[in-house]
Image: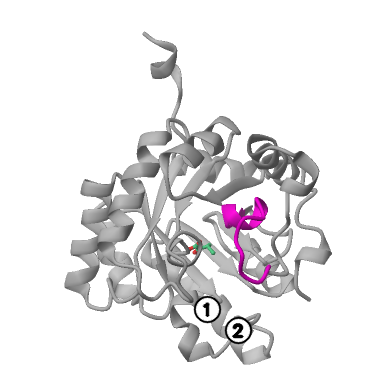
């Protein structure tokens, strides 16, 4: 057997074991084979083919114009560059607004794109869709908190769940999503105490982006950590290029800092 065949793929089971063992999960976005290989070699646990590609790759203002064809194409590229990490793909805006579209497009991301899990933003997503995807054997990551596909509804990229009723609703939603079969919860721009409570209550891995350190893992947008996105820097992302000097080194520093619980510090989190 060749060395290539000896590489063991990261699966949902591995991520669940990491949650139980208290070993932090490290994840980044990627949109092509070259960067996927860099991330894979650095020991990233899963790669998200995020619809953030609309902004960082396509140069758009929001993720809204991204199509299912874009997502399938970029997922195929990432899968080609990735041997070990699990590959998650985003379902783009309005690709899951009906049960029929949801099933059809999730299946396309897996069959044509090669994704191993799909991510949907809570809002457009309905609980019944999570159950249906789960019944069909399609793993689901549910994205809560700041959901960028709803940016025009939010009006601004802001921390979510600061008010008591909004925090309670997020806790209830997280429980309902897990009960419906969600395999991973992803919290974006959520106060750290709220993210910690959701993580304590959840038996599935909870991944944070701008959600503090007391979650099961961290994800950031690759272009942010490499400082190559000309847009406004988000408060919760760290420029790893400044200290590492090479792309491979920057990604390895991110993975090490997440695993050793050195990232995120309060400076990259919200009260
Ligand atoms: O599209 C994306 O990159 C994401 C991350 C911000 C989690 O959803």
Residue beneath disc 2: 168
Q: For residue 63, what is the image quadrant? A: bottom left
Q: Is mark 1 on a helix, strand or loop?
A: helix
Assess whether residue 206 is covered by the magenta stretch. no
Q: Is mark 2 within 8 Å of ligand 1?
A: no
Label 1 crowd (10 A; few <14 / some 14-19 / many >=20): few
- Name the side, left or right, on which 231 lies relative to 57: right
Assess whether residue 230 is covered by the magenta stretch. yes
Percent coordinates x, y for residue 106 in the rendering: 26, 59
Name the residue located 67 percent from the left edge and 89 percent from the top edge.
164
Q: In which quarter of the image is the C terminus?
A: bottom right
Percent coordinates x, y for residue 261 in the rendering: 77, 47
Label 2 crowd (10 A; few <14 / some 14-19 / many >=20): some
Name the residue located 44 percent from the left edge and 13 percent from the top edge.
3
Q: Is the magenta stretch mostly helix, strand or loop?
A: loop
Q: For residue 162, what is the image quadrant? A: bottom right
Residue beneath disc 1: 172
């Amino acid at each position: 057997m060749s060395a290539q065949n000896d590489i063991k793929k990261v699966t949902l089971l591995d991520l669940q074991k990491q949650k139980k063992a208290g070993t932090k999960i490290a994840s980044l976005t990627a949109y092509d084979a070259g960067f996927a290989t860099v991330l894979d070699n650095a020991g990233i646990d899963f790669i998200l083919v995020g619809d953030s590609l609309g902004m960082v790759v396509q140069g758009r203002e929001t993720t809204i114009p991204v199509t299912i064809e874009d997502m399938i194409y970029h997922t195929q590229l990432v899968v080609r560059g990735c041997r070990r990490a699990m590959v998650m793909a985003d379902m783009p805006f309005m690709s899951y607004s009906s049960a029929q579209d949801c099933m059809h497009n999730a299946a396309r991301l897996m069959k044509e794109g090669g994704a191993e899990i799909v991510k949907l933003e809570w809002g457009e997503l309905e609980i019944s869709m999570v159950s249906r995807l789960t019944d069909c054997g399609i793993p689901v990551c549910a994205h809560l908190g700041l959901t960028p596909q709803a940016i025009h509804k939010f009006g601004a990229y802001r921390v979510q769940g600061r008010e008591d009723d909004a925090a309670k609703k997020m806790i209830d939603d997280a429980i309902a999503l897990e009960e419906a079969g969600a395999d991973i919860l992803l919290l974006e721009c959520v106060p750290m105490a709220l993210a910690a409570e959701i993580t304590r209550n959840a038996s599935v891995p909870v991944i944070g982006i701008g959600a503090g350190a007391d979650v099961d893992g961290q994800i950031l947008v690759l272009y942010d950590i490499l400082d190559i996105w000309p847009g406004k820097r988000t408060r919760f992302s760290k420029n790893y290029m400044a200290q590492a000097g090479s792309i491979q080194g920057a990604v390895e520093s991110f993975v090490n800092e997440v695993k050793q619980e050195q990232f995120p510090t309060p400076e990259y989190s919200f009260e």
